[in-house]
Image (spheres, rainbow, N blue to C red):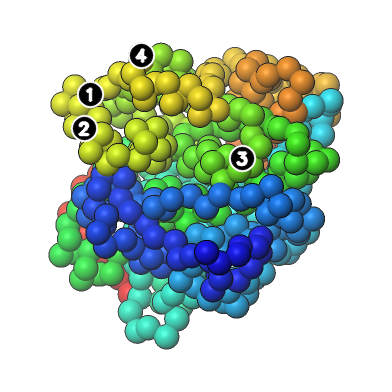
Amino acid sequence: MIARQAGASPGTLAPMDYVSTRGAWRDAPQSFTSILLEGLAPDGGLAIPKQYPRLSATELAALRPLGYADLAFAILSRFCTDITAEALRAIVARTYTADAFGSKEVTPLSTLGPGLHLLHLSNGPTLAFKDIALQLLGNLFEHVLEGGTRTLNILGATSGDTGSSAEYAMRGKRHIAVFMLSPRGRMSAFQQAQMYALRDPNIHNLAIEGTFDECQDIVKAIAANAAFKRRHFLGAVNSINWARIAAQIVYYFKGYFAATANDDQTVSFSVPSGNFGNVLAGHVARVMGLPIAQLIVATNENDVLDEFFRLGRYRPRRAAQTHATSSPSMDISRASNFERYMFDMVDRDPGQLAALWRTLERDGEFDIAGTAIGARIASSGFVSGRSTHADRIATIRDLHHAFGVIVDPHTADGVRVGRALCAPGIPLVCLETALPVKFAATIREALGFEPPRPTAYAGLEELPQRCTVLPADASRVEAYITAHAG
Ligand SMILES: *Cc1c(COP(=O)(O)O)cnc(C)c1O
């Protein structure tokens, strides 16, 4: 057994192997770089570490004084063991800069009142927390494609924040092109301008005449076409990408250290949730040994996950039953990362996981209330609640009135549910997932005035925009990719 040390070079750490949640790769575990470009296994499952790294108390204490980039290196080096320490250090140093994220803390913590904190995750280039993972992903992709001859064609669907974040992370990068599907006319004016105003030749905005779910279905259909996928070297940056989860683990550590004075304390996190990627990273941080008391899952009116955590019944809605809400980035009926959490809750038995998913396919739902799985879930630190339009408006008003801060509608959902469910005496860290300027209409409704706009974004909506409008038809999107792939 080699002695481990926080921040040690990956060379001294055991290699991290990845398996599929549904059993593939058990006899042929994959490396980090082999799952980096996608994260979906051949059996339809998701890539996940064979076992999570566990930090001793000494190792945890050694992380406390680290700045963001060093902390990111210390955490990520345990997951990215087939990238050299030197290269990984350079990648995180290039990614997590004050220049890109607005401050040297990268994710600063502010304190609103006793035991109530906001962890600011939204000061990256597109003003949503997704930049923290996608800026890293852009640099990781560039690293693994370096020296090759092929261009990776990234295909994705967005309801707003993922698309712009991915495009800003990949714009101008050699050997990478982005084909991003968005539901035409269904994003906020700011979100749409962020994407469609980009002029980089490697960025292709496809405005689909349909909903976000239809966009996602098209992406899935094309990704299922193995021959097409190989021919055009297609990759993905969607929220099932494991590297995104790994990158998000870092700020749970950062937020914990900022909210506590020593490692004997516990903290609860409240997390506005859609695809379950953000809060899954919190789950992994907790399993790694971060003293997290509660992970509070906040949903909006699309409360599939809230229903599951309260009742044990998982009943994803169909696209037509998914509400369009004023926290649109959480308008998700089928949370893709939920499968990774459930894999842990069935004690990492792919057979059990696959059986649950077969039930889901057959009956449209499964129910684990009263089972051993239910008991494991009850002790996994998760609680949940839902927030409605009226709740988020009231929360935005209340926070402005009481503390002089303006939060975006998603963050408001998190604060609302977090305050309702947090255990007394334990500090609550609410994750800020976007800046209010991205959702100005809701801020106007709540407060009667425009949210503040960072100066770099003045006049964004007036810039010329560029996109290609296509019907919700996978064959038309394939034809576009065939004509424009790098
Ligand atoms: C993506 C997003 C969410 C949901 O995060 P998940 O990782 O999908 O659970 C919440 N708020 C905002 C602003 C987002 O962009």
Tell me residue 318's x, y (percent): 28, 26
218 lies left or right of 413: left
Between marks 3 and 2, how big is the CA–CA gap? Answer: 34 Å
Judging by the rendered image, the residue that carries numbered circle 4 is 370
> The residue tagged with tag 3: helix, strand or loop?
loop
Looking at marks 3 and 4 on the same chain, the residue that comes earlier in the sequence is marked by 4
Between marks 2 and 1, how big is the CA–CA gap? Answer: 13 Å
Q: Find out if the beta carbon at label 3 lies less than 8 Å from the nearest ligand 1 atom.
A: yes
How would you rate the neighbour count of disc 1 (Cα within 10 Å): few for under 14, some for 14-19, many for 20 or more?
some
Q: Which mark is residue 337?
A: none
Looking at marks 2 and 1 on the same chain, the residue that comes earlier in the sequence is marked by 2
How would you rate the neighbour count of disc 3 (Cα within 10 Å): few for under 14, some for 14-19, many for 20 or more?
many
Judging by the rendered image, the residue that carries numbered circle 3 is 433
Q: Is residue 142 visible?
A: no
> The residue tagged with tag 1: helix, strand or loop?
loop
Relative vertical location of residue 209 with respect to residue 163 in this rendering, above or below: above
Amino acid type of the residue tagged 4 in the rendering: Gly
Disc 4, disc 2: CB below 8 Å? Answer: no
Tell me residue 97's x, y (percent): 71, 64
Between marks 3 and 1, how big is the CA–CA gap? Answer: 30 Å
The residue mark sitting in front, 3 or 1, is: 1
Q: Nearer the viewer, residue 241 or 208?
A: 241
Between marks 4 and 2, how big is the CA–CA gap? Answer: 17 Å
Q: Which mark is residue 364?
A: 1
Disc 3, disc 1: CB below 8 Å? Answer: no
